[in-house]
Amino acid sequence: MDKEQKILKRLKELAVLIKKHNHNYHTLDKPKISDQEFDKLVKENDVLEKKYPKLILKDSPNRIYGSKIKNNFTKIQHDSQMFSLANAFDDNDIKDFIKRSVKFLNLHNDDDFQYICEPKIDGLSLNLVYKNGNLISAGTRGDGFIGEDVTENILNIKNIPSKLKKDFPEFIEIRGEVFLNKSDFEKLNSELDNKSKFANPRNAAAGSLRQLDISISHSRPLKFIPHGIGKCSYNFDKIENYYDQLKYWNIAPNNLSKKCQSVEEIIKFYNQINQKRSAIDYDIDGLVVKINSFKLQERLGYVGKNPRWAIAIKFSAEKANTIIQSIDYQVGRTGAITPVARLQPVNLGGVIISNASLHNFDEINKKNINILDLVEIERAGDVIPYVTRLVKKNSKLNTKIKPPRNCPICKSNVLKEKDEAILRCSNTYGCSSQKIGRIIHFVSKKSLNIDGFGEKQVKQLFNLKYINKVEDIFNLEKFRSEIVELDGWGELSFSNLINSINNSKKISFDKFIYSLGIRFIGEVNAEILANEFKDLDVLISSSSNISVLENIDGLGPKAISSIIDFFSNKINKETIKNLKNHLTIIFIENETIDNFFSNKHLVFTGTLSELSRDEAKYLAKTKGAKILSSISKKTDFLIAGEKAGSKIDKASQLGVKILNEKEFLKKINL
């Protein structure tokens, strides 16, 4: 065999090997070799093809390499947004939830309320779309607006019919949870090798559903339980009526759901479910409470990404005792210095815990905590574990933990703001830990949502000086040759990261605002700003005008002060300028709403009788109005209830039209 024949033979062997390992990695999600070993095969193939171009195969790996990516599901847009639930952790949180609902609806009590309560399944959210009774699509939740199309993957799930029986609406979005029973999870894991085993049933359900090889999804015993409804061409009166219809269609809702009439009944049922949770053959992490009436749900509406008419009561926090081995400090993106206990590792709810937050130094002194003490730690839901109390003092150590005078990272001065127990590093734009924190926040799920770019990767690339600020992530390609040689990387991993970064470049305006990491600007305030200004340049030009910001309904003084500080900073201005070159920001278009108050500026004053002021504001916003906090020449209408104050006089002076409650309701078509 001559040299060329040997080279040709090796190229064919490499083609088979690379194709096989690509299939294992991308399709089966079960890599058999490391990235480094895979990269060696690719490099060997590249060297031979470069040296012997005449011998390049028709099915060369370089002609098909990269044609499949790990997350290459088609994106699917939901017809109506999928929201997430706010959390409650105790009886008082439930009572507060009901009080807020009563106040918002301007009722005296909750006598008119009925509640549907059901176990909160720890699974993967799914949106089923039926048109004329036929299943058209199935999509994961994604960011609430756009998910992944998994229609073909769910066709073998028994509780999801491809066609509904008669009496179906023309269009309906049925929402629920995909999960695995505990017994099925144990059986599945017993059939997998140690490297392929799943950590818990939720991960197993998600991994089984999101398979590029559809036959794998079909072979897994996935289950589905509906718990909600999106857009629908038919109006149901109550959740219980909707659930009855689901049963008729053979999409059985949770058989453990219960209708409750009072707070006391809810709490009693919560305790019952909590006691029997270990006997239930699927993982649950709480109880969902929903107001039964769809009419009341519509009136209550949403605040940010959470419905006002539902809440999830998380189960009691899991607790364990362990010893504090050391205490050190973390500096976050806002400069907050948090003391962290490094613990003797302990199993808490199936998770090995070795770190726990101590919150702040006032808490350390209050709990009298020190190194080598035996303490109780707690973990509720997805919350970071924290030290709750001292169990036993180590008598050998009598010294107190003293707060640092300088930042533990950059040695800058430490500040303590009024009314705050938290210490902060004063070096906002120079402290490396704050820089890292801002980058981690920028690439996180609620911001740009870049797959494969977690805290570990950010810290590694920052420490090696490949990134120094958020916009640097878009220039990583120029460091490809260096990064692929790093431990834990490789050509495949780096290519996947670049694909994820490129896929994240289209972002909604509210998410862009949130991604900037402005202090006191969470998801709700980011949405308020996006709805108010609808354009980045308008937001920037208005950010120094305190009177404009103070007139935005829902923004508090701390948020306003933070906005002014952020947009007046030269470094932040430069960052935004650079990000505009890399990102496509999707702005909210001015909707044409056929209503009297469309695009009008409203101010409310006094006490309303039929609606609460909060509901009246919410209703006006849904009709296209903008709500202002104070009267100005910009105001179109003052809505005046009983006992209206000085705003009426100011409105009269400025020639602003005044409407009473009846006139307002008539104009808004109620």
Image (tube, helix red, strand yellow):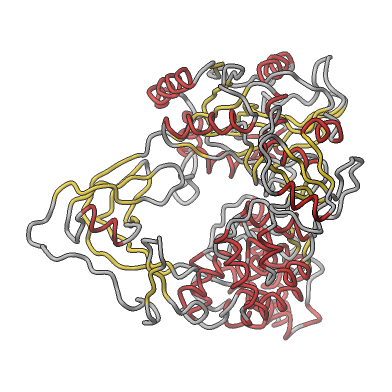
Above or below 650: residue 312: above
Report the residue that reaches farthest toward the bottom.
51
Q: Is residue 515 left or right of residue 616?
A: left
Report the residue that reaches farthest toward the left.
396
Mark yes or no: residue 283 visible.
no
Q: Quadrant of the N terminus?
A: bottom right
**Could you say which quadrant of the image residue 171 lies in?**
top right
Which percent across, then down, holds residue 196? 50, 48
Above or below 308: residue 422: below
Q: Quadrant of the C terminus?
A: top right
- Residue drawn at x 61%, y 63% as measured from the top left: 560
Which percent across, then down, holds residue 241? 70, 15
- Residue drawn at x 63%, y 33% as measured from the top left: 104
Q: Nearer the viewer, residue 185 or 431?
A: 431
Which percent across, then down, holds residue 56? 78, 75
Q: Nearer the viewer, residue 607 or 157?
A: 607
Q: Nearer the viewer, residue 641 or 503?
A: 641
- Residue drawn at x 54%, y 61% as measured from the top left: 558
Q: Is residue 340 left or right of residue 151?
A: left
Which percent across, then down, holds residue 379? 37, 45
Q: How many marks?
A: 0
Q: Is residue 530 left or right of residue 267?
A: right
- Residue drawn at x 52%, y 65% as measured from the top left: 34
Mark yes or no: residue 596 visible.
yes
